[in-house]
Image (tube, helix red, strand yellow):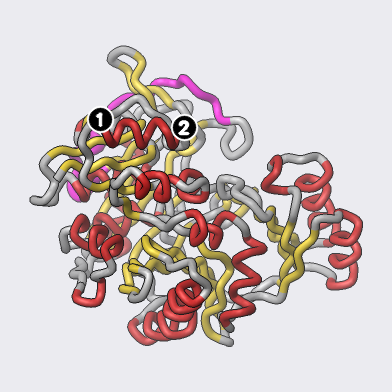
Amino acid sequence: MRILVVGSGGREHSLCWAISASPLCDKLFCAPGNPGIAALAECLPVGAEDIPGIVAAAKAQKIDFVVVGPEAPLVAGIVDRLAEAGIPAFGPMAVAAQLEGSKGFMKDFCARAGIPTAEYRRFTDADLARAYIREKGAPIVVKADGLAAGKGVVVAATLEEALAAIDDAMVAGRFGKAGAEVVVEEFLDGEEASFFALCDGEHALSFGAAQDHKRVGDGDTGPNTGGMGAYSPTKLVDAAMEKRIMETIVLPTVAGMAKEGAPFKGVLFAGLMIGKAGPKLIEFNVRFGDPECQTLMLRLKSDLLPALIASQQGELKRFDLRWRDDTAICVVMAAEGYPNTPKKGTEIRNLDAAGKLDGVTVFHAGTKADGAKIVADGGRVLGVCAIGKTAKDAQAKAYKAVDAIDWPGGFCRRDIGWRVL
């Protein structure tokens, strides 16, 4: 089969890494890809959000199956357009991708489907949002309704922070149209986990759990980011908790979306808060998490590609997956200035040597080639990953690789995996 992966980040590099190992994959393409992906796939100069360009490239290259990595093209309808061209793709159609594209839609759906989540209100008027916040008090959570690259959520410890978040999104327009509407919801106590399930519109299959580190600084300090690191598995989601999550959140979502005429196919990523009352849904994403995907790909023993195809074809019921018992850790190396204004163009050296260390895989996320040099070209630039028999072993391997990389213009958290350790 001729496979096309859409995207250019660390998630897409790890997907290409896994798909390239499949005996079903005869030729792998990625659009637009990155220098790390170029070692595994032929990179096509087409942006992930250039949907007509992606469709044209898929036709020109006689692609048999497309795997869409990022959320923006999914929400914009890339799977719909590919289907119209007769090209099957992994991921939800636009009507189902609203589960991530609009937090308000997701919360309203949860209310209809009886899925446990935080109490909430939706607002398009800043004054009404401020009045509700003052009524409820802090801590409280403010979310931009639309896609904001993982930066549209403010967990406000004080009223002042919450009111500033309203001003930021609705008055200053920091997130553009994505922040024209906000969701304000109750603060949930507990510990966060990321849970993944492959879905085929009728059935769902657990794809494991991970824990992410959202804040930029050690000890979970500083502003939220797209993710500074992750590890999998997590003791927080044992077999009993997995069963409970599937029964109370994932399967009701698959059934509810089908009932509403928007069957969900692809990967459903449930961001959860697990506390004394059990798992509650924080948000849905309609693609693999980044950097969680990197840890899942390292642990997966089964061939990924048939499972993705089964999701698209409605044949997941007969599927099972095999996993390594080891722990995988991903440490994100980000460019100086992230998550605000990352500094681009700084050279990164010694990547090959770091990637050859025992148990280590380095995934490119925001890099580009500058002649023979690799330079930073984004906020989150590298995913330095390792797998080991224990979390301590995996963490030690990952940081050994981080220290082997020569990049004065980058930084990382030094405590990824602290919860499990």
User: What residue lies at 20% left-to-right and 55% top-to-bottom?
Assistant: 305
Q: CA distance from mark 1 to mark 2?
A: 38 Å
- Considering depth in this image, is 412 or 230 the residue closer to the camera? 230
- Considering depth in this image, is 218 or 60 the residue closer to the camera? 60
Q: Say if the magenta span includes residue 353.
A: yes
Residue 380 placement (x, y as % from top left): 47, 38
Name the residue carrying label 1: 60
Is 165 positioned to the left or the right of 294 in the image?
right
Is 363 positioned to the left or the right of 48 in the image?
left
- Considering depth in this image, is 381 or 246 the residue closer to the camera? 246
Q: How many other residues sit within 10 Å of disc 1, few (<14), some (14-19) or many (≥20)?
A: few
Residue at the left extreme, as displayed: 23
User: Helix, strand or loop at disc 2?
Assistant: strand
- Considering depth in this image, is 213 or 2 the residue closer to the camera? 2
Q: Mark 1 or 2, which is nearer the eye?
A: 1
Q: The magenta stretch spans which residues?
A: 342-361
First in residue order: circle 1 vs circle 2: 1
Residue 300 placement (x, y as % from top left): 22, 61
The quarter of the picture where residue 182 lies is: bottom right
Residue 278 placement (x, y as % from top left): 53, 84
Q: Say if the magenta span includes residue 79.
A: no
Q: Amino acid at mark 1?
A: Ala
User: What residue lies at 42% left-to-right and 33% top-to-bottom?
Assistant: 52
From this viewpoint, is residue 340 visible?
yes
Q: Quadrant of the N terminus?
A: top left
Is 215 positioned to the left or the right of 380 in the image?
right
Residue 125 placement (x, y as % from top left): 86, 55
Q: Amino acid at mark 2?
A: Gly
User: Helix, strand or loop at disc 1?
Assistant: helix
Name the residue carrying label 2: 410
